[in-house]
Image (tube, grey):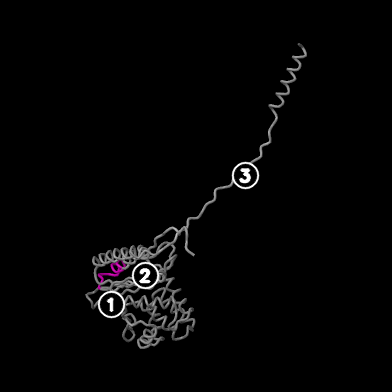
């Protein structure tokens, strides 16, 4: 009997020992889920673009109709090729100080870009500060109205006429010609070197803060602006004002050339408000004129 109890106890001890034995666990590698990029194709959506254009032109026309005086504009996006305008070929719009860019461009073309230190200082003051005395000096050095007429013909500005005698501020132009001038400054040719164009656009990009109004209202955060504005009282036209602004607004997916010109304005401030209203509307809604739609890639493309 005692032997049976000893055998039973031994069996229990063995069983207990087996119960605490640790079994080695071998980890199994688990693969992370693979992300598959969705393939989509982008296509122009001309129908949506046409509808957006109709809405924008309608809203611009409504805005302009509620503003005093005459308001005309021209816009061209060099990236998308989108253009729009209203009265863009009306060529009796006075430029006032807007003609100062013309003077500098003509002088650079005439001198093959070789300006003296004093002339470069005059050019800087003429564009950045809109200094009239500097403009008088460079208008004379470029050769006055006769030389400016030849310059306009050479670069293709058919709707621009220089001011009479020494009155460069009396130069008349159209919004379409302002955009043509900007296009030459951006793309080159017509006797202007890349250095000449960099000089003009560089100065236009650094105008004094109090003169940075106008088409700059079309800019999105982060866009770069190069512009020149003009403003002058018209005492012989019912004591009204002419106020103009044109320039380049460039940023991701956009290279906008824009000119907005007004006259018969009751005051300078009213003209500025009108220009900025037009520019802001165009800047905010320009992208909608060249929309795209997306479609999934075909699953079984034909080779």
Compared across the picture, whether 128 is left or right of 7 comes to: left
Q: Magenta segment, principal secondary structure?
A: helix
Q: Where is residue 118 in the image (x, y as percent from the top left)?
A: 47, 81
Compared across the picture, whether 42 is left or right of 49 comes to: right
Q: Where is residue 33 in the image (x, y as percent from the top left)?
A: 54, 48
Circle 1 — which element?
loop
Q: Which of 112 and 142 is in front in this view?
A: 112
* Crowd band around label 2 with a 10 angstrom C-alpha radius: few (<14), some (14–19), many (20+): some
> From where the camera sits, is residue 231 visible?
yes
* Crowd band around label 1 with a 10 angstrom C-alpha radius: few (<14), some (14–19), many (20+): some
N-term mark: 2 or 1:
2
> From where the camera sits, is residue 217 visible?
no
Q: Which residue is drawn at 38% across and 75% down?
A: 130
Q: Which residue is drawn at 28% across and 64% down?
A: 59
Query: Which residue is label 1 attached to?
Result: 90
Q: Position of residue 134 (x, y in %)?
A: 40, 80
Q: Quadrant of the N terminus?
A: top right
Q: How far apart are marks 3 and 1 (CA)?
A: 75 Å
Q: Distance between the residues labelled 2 and 1?
A: 20 Å
User: Which tag is nearer the camera, tag 3 or tag 1?
Assistant: 3
The stretch drawn in magenta includes residue 207: no
Q: Which of 174 and 296 is in front in this view?
A: 296
Circle 3 — which element?
loop
Query: Which residue is label 3 attached to?
Result: 29
Query: Which residue is label 2 attached to?
Result: 82
Q: Give the range drawn in magenta.
A: 264-274
């Amino acid at each position: 009997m005692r032997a049976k109890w000893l055998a039973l106890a031994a069996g229990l001890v063995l069983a207990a020992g087996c119960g605490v034995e640790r079994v080695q666990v071998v980890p199994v590698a688990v693969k992370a889920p693979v992300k598959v990029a969705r393939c989509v194709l982008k296509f122009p959506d001309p129908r949506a673009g046409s509808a957006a254009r109709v809405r924008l032109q309608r809203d611009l026309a409504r805005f302009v109709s509620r503003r005093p005086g005459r308001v005309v504009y021209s816009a061209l996006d060099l990236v998308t090729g989108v253009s729009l305008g209203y009265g863009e070929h009306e060529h009796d719009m006075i430029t006032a100080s807007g003609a100062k860019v013309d003077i500098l461009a003509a002088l650079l073309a005439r001198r093959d870009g070789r300006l003296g230190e004093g002339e470069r200082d005059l050019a800087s003051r003429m564009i950045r500060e809109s200094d009239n005395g500097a403009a008088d000096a460079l208008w004379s050095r470029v050769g006055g109205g006769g030389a400016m007429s030849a310059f306009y013909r050479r670069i293709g500005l058919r709707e621009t006429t220089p001011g009479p005698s020494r009155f460069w501020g009396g130069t008349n132009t159209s919004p379409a010609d302002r955009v043509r001038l900007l296009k030459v400054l951006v793309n080159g040719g017509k006797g202007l070197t890349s250095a000449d164009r960099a000089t003009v656009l560089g100065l236009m990009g650094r105008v004094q803060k109090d003169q940075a109004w106008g088409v700059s209202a079309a800019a999105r955060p982060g866009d770069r602006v190069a512009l020149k504005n003009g403003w002058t009282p018209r005492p012989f036209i019912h004591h009204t004002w002419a106020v103009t602004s044109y320039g380049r607004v460039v940023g991701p997916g956009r290279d906008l050339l824009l000119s907005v010109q007004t006259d018969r304005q009751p005051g300078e401030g009213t003209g500025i408000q009108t220009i900025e209203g037009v520019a802001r509307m165009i800047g905010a809604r320009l992208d909608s004129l060249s929309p795209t739609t997306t479609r999934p890639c075909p699953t079984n493309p034909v080779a």
